[in-house]
Image (spheres, rainbow, N blue to C red):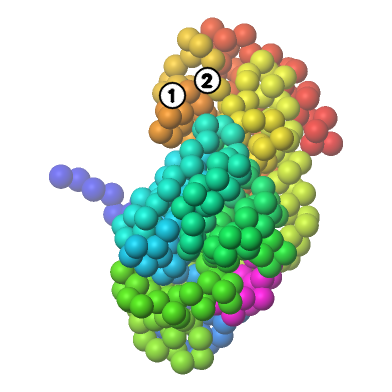
Amino acid sequence: MSFSPSFNPPTRILMGPGPSGAHPRVLKAMTAPILGHLDPEFLKIMDECNDMLRAVMGTSNRITLATPGTGTSGMEAAVMNLVQPGEKVVVGICGYFGERIAVMAERAGGVVTRVQAPWGSPTDLAGVQAAVKAAGNVKLIGIVHAETSTGVQTPVEPFVKLAKDSGALLLVDCVTSLGGVPVTVDAWGADAVYSGTQKCLSAPPGMAPLTMSPAAWDAIKAREVPCNSWYLDLSLLEAYWDERRAYHHTAPISMVYALHEALALVLDEGLEARWARHEKNGRALQAGLEAMGLVLHADAGYRLPVLTTVRIPEGVNDAEVRGALLHRHGIEFGGGLGDLRAKVWRIGLMGESSNPGNVLLALRSLGNILREQGFKADVRAAVDTAATGLA
Ligand SMILES: *Cc1c(COP(=O)(O)O)cnc(C)c1O
């Protein structure tokens, strides 16, 4: 058997549902020498990460840290710590990731009500209101801010009001929104919010920013039985991330460097400017796709700028188109998940990947490949329309 001594990945333009392209400064930060995880210089970096996370998440919550593991570790930490056996949970589901929250809440022993919305529409507020009322004494309401499986953004504020009125805590999945569209934890009044490093924060996958409101933290402190997960038990993680520095696990040192650099980049750019950049590029792409003759899948008015779902036209081969994009142009799009398998493409414009060059390149490349497939894509109109939006 022959093998090559080192791996040289091909150059790719990551325009799928994540990971997105990492900033060169983030990749460089990861090559810095490893420090001991209790080295004072490393502890300083951990503290700075927490401070920058508070700024990026729009919160003053004391419990703000990053769990080791990808975005799902943040979800699992939030759900496992907040839900005790027998407690009632209502999850508003409008795609793949909402269902994941519901499954986790069941594994935590929760009594879960699922409120389903069509894949392409936002979370069903009236349905969640009715379910909360019917269940009574609900501990936790869970929603997904940015549903990466459908490209839909659900407005958070009405769910905050519902949670406050009913005495429940509100969990919001912001894995795909943080760093790309406004996430304002304290202004919202959300209780448990988590994200991931590899979407709009443009670091490699590997950590999950997480914040808990004082009310959520009180609920965790008041647990009668310990959290089902030892690794993600926030009472233990807190003692590691705060001044006690009680050994719990070895921090993923290079990932903490990466997160630190990625957050510094977000704050350098400025949150408002960063949100505006994602908005402009996303809307230009969407206008271009429609001008090409394609149909956007998500409900108008709820479309995420950072993740666009577009329907695959009749007679066009999903795998061939994505294969040609990857092999000829180095462009990665995502395929459909779950109910949307082979029905849509998912085009991400997250973090570093969200730039005008990628918008135009994606439209031109996709349009030409679609023409080979027999679909009369109007490539010129697509590019002209997008260029106008980008100007
Ligand atoms: C990507 C994603 C997750 C899961 O994150 P991983 O990093 O893949 O573990 C959860 N929720 C949403 C909305 C996501 O987009």
Badge 1 element: loop
Q: Is residue 45 left or right of residue 279?
A: left
Contact? badges 1 and 2 (CB < 8 Å): yes
Vertical position of residue 36 compared to residue 251: above or below = below
The residue shown at (52%, 32%) is: 118
The residue shown at (31%, 69%) is: 228
Q: Is residue 291 magenta?
A: no
Can see residue 52? no
| Residue at the left extreme, as displayed | 1
The residue shown at (53%, 72%) is: 216
Q: Residues within 10 Å of mark 1 (few under 14, many from 20)?
A: some
Q: How far apart are labels 1 and 2 at the CA level?
A: 7 Å
Q: Position of residue 78 (x, y in %)?
A: 46, 65
- Closer-to-camera residue (325/146): 146
Q: Is residue 63 magenta?
A: yes
Q: Is residue 227 left or right of residue 166?
A: left
Q: Quadrant of the N terminus?
A: top left
Vertical position of residue 223 compared to residue 99: above or below = below
Asked if the residue at label 1 sits under 8 Å from ligand 1, the reply is: no
Residue annotated with mark 1: 342
Q: Position of residue 328 (x, y in %)?
A: 50, 27
Q: What range of the chain is rendered magenta?
A: 51-65
Q: Residues within 10 Å of mark 2 (few under 14, many from 20)?
A: many
Three-letter amino acid code at disc 1?
Answer: Ala
Residue annotated with mark 2: 312
Query: Which quadrant would residue 262 be assigned to in this image?
Result: bottom right
Three-letter amino acid code at disc 2?
Answer: Ile
